[in-house]
Amino acid sequence: MSRTLIKGGTVVTASETVRCDVLIEGEKVVALLGGDAPEPTVDRVIDATDRLIFPGSVDAHTHMEIPFGAATSKDTFETGTQAAAWGGTTTIIDFPIQMKGESLMGSFEDTMAKAAGSSAIDFGFHQIVGDVNEQSLADLDLVLEEGVTSYKLFTAYPGVYYSTDAEVAKVMQWASGNGSTILMHAENGSAIDLLREQAVARGDTAPYAHAATRPAALEGEAAHRVILLAEMTGAPVYIVHISAKQVVAEIAAARARGTNAFGETCPQYLYLELAMLDQGFEGAKYVCSPPLRDPAEGHQAALWQGLSNGALQVIATDHCPFDFEGQKTLGRDDFTQIPNGLPVVEHRFPLMLHAALAEQRFSLNRMVEISAAAPAKMFGLYPQKGTIAVGCDADIAIVDPAATSVISAETHHMNVDYSCFEGMELTGKVETVFSRGQLIVSDDRFVGSKSHGRYLRRGLNQLLF
Amino acid sequence: MSRTLIKGGTVVTASETVRCDVLIEGEKVVALLGGDAPEPTVDRVIDATDRLIFPGSVDAHTHMEIPFGAATSKDTFETGTQAAAWGGTTTIIDFPIQMKGESLMGSFEDTMAKAAGSSAIDFGFHQIVGDVNEQSLADLDLVLEEGVTSYKLFTAYPGVYYSTDAEVAKVMQWASGNGSTILMHAENGSAIDLLREQAVARGDTAPYAHAATRPAALEGEAAHRVILLAEMTGAPVYIVHISAKQVVAEIAAARARGTNAFGETCPQYLYLELAMLDQGFEGAKYVCSPPLRDPAEGHQAALWQGLSNGALQVIATDHCPFDFEGQKTLGRDDFTQIPNGLPVVEHRFPLMLHAALAEQRFSLNRMVEISAAAPAKMFGLYPQKGTIAVGCDADIAIVDPAATSVISAETHHMNVDYSCFEGMELTGKVETVFSRGQLIVSDDRFVGSKSHGRYLRRGLNQLLF
Amino acid sequence: MSRTLIKGGTVVTASETVRCDVLIEGEKVVALLGGDAPEPTVDRVIDATDRLIFPGSVDAHTHMEIPFGAATSKDTFETGTQAAAWGGTTTIIDFPIQMKGESLMGSFEDTMAKAAGSSAIDFGFHQIVGDVNEQSLADLDLVLEEGVTSYKLFTAYPGVYYSTDAEVAKVMQWASGNGSTILMHAENGSAIDLLREQAVARGDTAPYAHAATRPAALEGEAAHRVILLAEMTGAPVYIVHISAKQVVAEIAAARARGTNAFGETCPQYLYLELAMLDQGFEGAKYVCSPPLRDPAEGHQAALWQGLSNGALQVIATDHCPFDFEGQKTLGRDDFTQIPNGLPVVEHRFPLMLHAALAEQRFSLNRMVEISAAAPAKMFGLYPQKGTIAVGCDADIAIVDPAATSVISAETHHMNVDYSCFEGMELTGKVETVFSRGQLIVSDDRFVGSKSHGRYLRRGLNQLLF
Amino acid sequence: MSRTLIKGGTVVTASETVRCDVLIEGEKVVALLGGDAPEPTVDRVIDATDRLIFPGSVDAHTHMEIPFGAATSKDTFETGTQAAAWGGTTTIIDFPIQMKGESLMGSFEDTMAKAAGSSAIDFGFHQIVGDVNEQSLADLDLVLEEGVTSYKLFTAYPGVYYSTDAEVAKVMQWASGNGSTILMHAENGSAIDLLREQAVARGDTAPYAHAATRPAALEGEAAHRVILLAEMTGAPVYIVHISAKQVVAEIAAARARGTNAFGETCPQYLYLELAMLDQGFEGAKYVCSPPLRDPAEGHQAALWQGLSNGALQVIATDHCPFDFEGQKTLGRDDFTQIPNGLPVVEHRFPLMLHAALAEQRFSLNRMVEISAAAPAKMFGLYPQKGTIAVGCDADIAIVDPAATSVISAETHHMNVDYSCFEGMELTGKVETVFSRGQLIVSDDRFVGSKSHGRYLRRGLNQLLF
């Protein structure tokens, strides 16, 4: 097998920052070597002088090519995983979606068919359970056998993905029996739908109404509820895409009393804000659910704080890109028709790098923890993914911490016509990316292949109390 | 320099459990090598098949040869550090004690003189500030230059170590200016002394009264107070030897609002309990401050929970051994004359190993975090100490996870005539210990030297928000 | 008009305990007179020497002759209001029940028809909204015009009274616009129904399963949710028949942040307990929703505490009696068929009197507040009802505080074949009762009339912040 | 005895608003009469048409003629009680002050000597315990026999009134044994003194520094601490002159867990604010302790909220007036020399009347509760004081709710050269005041006498759980 030595750099993992060389053999890291260690013979040397060497990043929440109302999210597994790679992400976990009335196992197979052979990087799946019934409960056992150890339900979107509390509890009971983790989209969909109908009825149809009808208190309410259901059933619960300070507080309180409750937020909830929806229909570019929040209410500060103090464990993206022209514009006359979602997969790791390097929001180690190690542990992929250690997959992102770059739709690699972070200048630049020992980004070119990425059968949550 | 290869074992750090070999050159780890990596030439091979390889453990709270009333704690730096080594601990942080009316710099120099040349393992110091005045404040700057970055004050022991809130605040202001961390013994000494006097006055003089006059609520009160003083001054605060659930809650709440508040507990507060004091004068064996608590009130459960969920970061010992005969017995007629303290330094790491291996209270990784990595980070020694990584000190404890041992005063190595854990059977056994590359425990013999241990100049707290 | 003087007694209101005479003219109290005041000429003197004179008590929660599954609650307005009078209660507020698919206004008219001309004491109505739709929302305005200023919804009983969160919010929005108060039966009916189905499916069909499938946490969850909906809509919310400590905490927290949240508990949740359901089918006598709770979990203590510190404002009964033979027995093979409800209306005031006189749980004044003054203020009847003051209705209960009585189905006046307080000995005895100046209980006889009670048009909540 | 009838008005008590006439005979209210009640023969009729009739108000916290540093508070019992009467206050509770090294009983006797024969209205005493020692503890028993049932200690003012936690606990233990209530001035005096010294040392000597060196968090800290000491000892604790939201929260939390903790605030903390100190030396007019707070931090809102929801029970004044010229000016070069205190006794009731009538902050009944009924109950004077009921003292304030007045030093009756509420226009005007049946304010004249006021021997706290 071919040997590569990444030489002269500084390895940054969740726990250490260490000057050492990384020896890759085939798909694996086989040694970490200090300057005084005997030098191995290798086929290729990558000069990492003045560079930081990170474990390939893990995005635990993406939605490639999924339908939302009349639109389909623009990134396919092919375009989306390549964009991810450009940003140093070497693992994604996407979602087969069982729709109401459809087969759960079918949704898994369909999504697998889309992703297999089309992904530049490795991928796993969380299964969305959109219709809790006898057949879908039976299918859960089959999907579990395929290495899917996390299942997502919604208290939002009545009539679409919404589950009643009984349905949530039923799936949690099942998960509790086998150690799976339940992901929850926590917003009170019932009350939100009332507010949406009333907004439309009174002609309040601009994008801003999308946020105004999804108050933070209703996100907090749903989080409180699903955490209690998790406590009742014994299932670990992971609340996705948290935007509201109330949810941070609910998770902190649950963890303080010993509950396996976990939380994820996304860069958009940290760096973007409510006011961005309030600019006529341009605001549609910022429509996602839960919505962006008002910093004056302290949400962003609470999220950053939660990432620092451990109330939140994971930074993911909820990547779900829609073109402004032709897709977001479906809701020009009615905000309820705007497809929900933002393009983020490419910039999550660079944004967090910037947060650590330029904004000193947390250490580089904590940055690696929330963006790579913790999602890998949470979803049973560690230490294969999420760190750089002997025996792990050689998923590596080499970064020049002194370089800068500017985010722009002109230059990004996601298949979407705008960027919600347009113009933002970032400190730190991902230069070189390996996926399982294969160089996939180098010298400003994508050098990987469409069929390199493999499906990841995952183990159970390693972050349980 | 001499090379040693620890071969065939499994390295367990705070973040990973990895099958790999560890290459030591001189005092340092220079490589971590997988089975497929090129084999280095070495001088010595340690066979670690079926063994776990841990970073040498870090005990951040010991008291060797200190006075307490009429007694002096029995372990000298020589006996105490050797006992520590037997239990896999390769770093201790001890305390120079400035007494009222004495010189702070003098206390530092005296303690250094005692430890230097007498320690089997590396050691650092927290400085106790027992008399806040102009001279001692001036001395703080000098001690800081010696690499002491943490300072301890007491809200307990009026007339002895006690500082007023103004004095605590004054030292915190100083610490805030240079990044040092303030350690607090948090009990309301004023109210406690009233209860003690009243107990003695009514003839309630048995050891149990020691605990009865130090209620958990008064530990919680003091913790609340010093955390507010820390918030007012901006200094990081680390509460030592936490025994009460109230303190766990105070720290969790402070951290949730972004305060740099930290907490340490000790094995005695986890495994021992109030009732042990209630057996006539035998109870004196369990006299320490704060006292052991009643499990029916939930203290022990809250401490375990805190170690798991991150409210507490460190497990240390407050090791302060007194013989039962001749020392504890000084208080036979009056519990206030019993010297406070327990012998624990040898068994902290083995007990935590047992908690992870046999009781599944947390993962082995979390065990390493609370007993080695976090104290090293908290007190500016990481990654030199607290982990196994390229470039770190070769402080290593090799453990047979299948072996068992029984704690007994008959066999322990601490210089004290009883064990407070007498008869407890532990899963896991420390077999081999390295300190800075030198073998110090091997084949059931201490093979280190009295003068091996070096003084550690420490950096600042690496766990700040 | 006829004049009566109640002479020589001690008047006890929510605010005072005062030795004075009460002068009644017609239906009203027209003077309170001290011993030195000029003596009026009167038609009748009631000697109240050594007696306590209370305002007639107000039971804000009764269910006369309502269907529950296959059974109808045994007390008619005729029997139920006479039983109430025996126990010193001179006002009840009952509930017209709109069932799914039925007319709201129709339910109001039907219940009015049952109560009018059949009640021994005055009565008002809270309207149950069992089917939120355009017609029922329109009917609400009509019912409001009839002096109904409080409306009840359920998060329990899916398919029967259950409202979705959107429906609850919609009615709250309406109430917020006119100042009405929303009553909530707060239990998570969706999750409870799952547990019930699962219990039945596994053959767990005894009465105890009724309680086991309605955990306290699910009562707390629903309370949390409806309080947030109340905050979102601006409606005052009053949570009925609280049994769980979690709900007490939710209300206290809401009130601390300025929310108009109120709470009611009932004697059964204070004096009875979970274990009573665990005695085979006899347990059916104690089946009500929410269920009786386990004192070991602190529920009863929290309820008493809440009544003392103001977190809870009202003690009512949720009186809903079913015979054990023939009614409760409908569920002999399946607890889900046991009609829910207990017979309490006669003993609420005597039990609270006992709690104050014999158990010193609170002062007599606080007792009057929670059982008469506060419900009267909460539901817009004060000071017409709930106190003894010049100008108020002469609703009066004269009590011998030195007498005792024993509760028994043999002697009670409710139309039901058992008592859930059987054998309990109470200190204090209601001897004489006036309703609007008319003597209705005297010398151990009911001397009122079936048609004396009048419908009470009510004002708005007088306890709002 | 002479009879007076107050005719045609509306009586407002803590519990009722009732149209009725009030019959006074001698010093007592002997009857409340409705329009239809038989008319009594009387000596004098006061026409109260369109007027509100309130119980004379109770100010539970005044400091007449006391030393503060080099100054003595300007109002004597003579001038201060007359000013109180003008504002509808008919009872004050003042404070004998035991200074360090002085006799406690002596301080009681001295203060009694000053007040007796000099007070226009009735008065009671709380005893300040400024030096906890054997003699003063012995004296407490003597003072208790004089009808003093409440004792005040300070965590502020080290070296002056300050008690250590042990001393506070010791007096609380004594109080717990006899049912007395402990009043606490809760600020962390130790930390405050450090900040004061540092402010002076750096030349920060203007009045604003007075507030800047007494942060709200240190008031909250002390409240937390004394509540825990109260819980430990079993004594009821009443925190005086609360200015900080943290204290409101501490009391609410304590009450929620069943602790007899009570809170008082004062008009200055509701209507005045931090910025008023920031106007050069004019700011000295607003120097009091604790200091005025910043509304942007939510303190005032929390205090109003606490008065509404019951976390706070009492509105008093901490009346302690110093002339600006000659007294406040003592601190012109050094804020620490400014005597602390504000002139408020005359305007407390008028301000609360305004808060209810014009600002709708609470009902008139709740206003009477916090300003008359609750202080009377808290300090064992109810129903003799604090309400209008048969048998109570005829202390009555008749108010024209339609009239307005403007506060000004030009027109007020306190013996001080400025008003901290200068220019404030109030709705509602106190027209007529009775003290124990004697007319003392009428037709814009003080018609009482210097020797009318009597010392009140008080009972125990009637508001205990």
Image (cartoon, coloured by chain):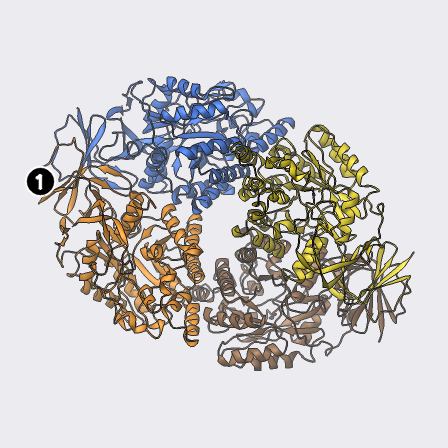
Chain colours: A orange, B blue, C brown, D yellow
Question: Mark 1 belongs to which subunit?
Answer: A
Q: Quadrant of residue A6?
A: top left
* Any part of residue A1 in sight: no
Say whether residue C452 is left or right of residue C139: right
Q: Is residue A439 above or below residue B58?
A: below
Q: Is residue A110 left or right of residue A341?
A: left
Left or right? Give the position of B319 relative to C450: left
Front residue (pair B321, A324): A324
Q: Nearer the viewer, residue D57 or B454?
A: D57
In the image, residue A54 lies at what x, y percent?
22, 45
> Which residue position is annotated with label 1?
A42
> Which corner quadrant holds the N terminus of chain C?
bottom right
> A417 or A242, which is in the foreground?
A417
- In which quadrant of the rendered view does residue A162 lie? bottom left
Q: Position of residue D142 (x, y in %)?
A: 77, 35
Tally the numbered discs: 1
| Residue C60 showing in the rendered view | yes
Element carrying mark 1: loop
Amino acid identity at mark 1: Val
Quadrant where the C terminus of chain C is found in the figure: bottom right
Crowding around mark 1 (Cα neighbors within 10 Å: few <14, some 14 to 19, many 20+) is few
Percent of width and height locating residue B413: 36, 22
At x 65%, y 28%, the residue is B202
Question: Residue B215: horizontal and vertical position, in percent?
Answer: 55, 36
